[in-house]
Image (cartoon, rainbow, N blue to C red):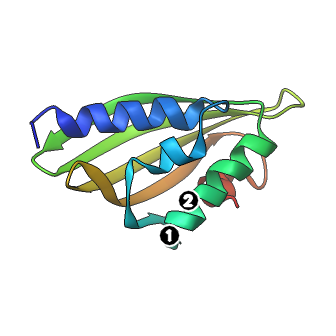
Amino acid sequence: MADHAPEKIIRDMFAMFTDFGSDLDALTAFMTPDYRQLVDGREMTLADFRAHALALREGLSSLEIEILHLVCEADRAATVHLASATRPSGVRSVIRVVAFYQFRDGRLCLVDELTRVQQGHHGDDALGSLQ
């Protein structure tokens, strides 16, 4: 895996994740079949991640991700990023995410993240694992 590959994978995956018109199969192609995601202590499988992406597409009008910090080393990476979610009502939430990524064969096999609501309302703390 080239040194720049993890950064490209993360940026491309986020671009597709926030494009609600993108194909879910293409999105999950970034992940290994045994993909695991830990969000604030809750574990999700690849099927759970797919359900999460679908739930966000159904419940939000838009989602933007701004990467504040990104560090890559071999088959690992870490980000600090802001997820800005807008509901159909126009209500906006901003969630700060600190995430660790593990790659295998050019695909994500593990994401371990902690989230904190910076702007929003009750229930926004569950957006990171919404299904």
Q: Is 1 situated above or below 11?
A: below
Q: Amino acid at mark 1?
A: Thr
Q: Residue at x 63, y 49 (%)?
A: 53
Q: Residue at x 77, y 30 (%)?
A: 61
Q: Quadrant of residue 67?
A: top left
Q: Label 1: which residue?
A: 45
Query: Disc 1 and disc 2: Cα gap in Å?
Result: 6 Å
Quarter occupied by the N terminus: top left
Q: Residue at x 39, y 48 (%)?
A: 98
Mark 1: give few (<14), some (14-19) or many (20+) Cα within 10 Å: some
Task: Work out whether residue 75 or residue 129 is closer to the camera in this orientation and state it.
Answer: 75
Q: Position of residue 36 (x, y in %)?
A: 41, 68
- The dot on residue 49 is 2
Task: Work out whether residue 47 or residue 97 is closer to the camera in this orientation and state it.
Answer: 47
Q: Residue at x 50, y 43 (%)?
A: 27
Q: Is residue 72 left or right of residue 128?
A: left
Q: Is 85 situated above or below 52?
A: above
Q: Quadrant of residue 3?
A: top left
Task: Work out whether residue 67 or residue 13 is closer to the camera in this orientation and state it.
Answer: 13
- Asked whether the beta carbons under mark 1 and mark 2 sit within 8 Å of each other, the answer is yes
Q: Amino acid at mark 2?
A: Phe
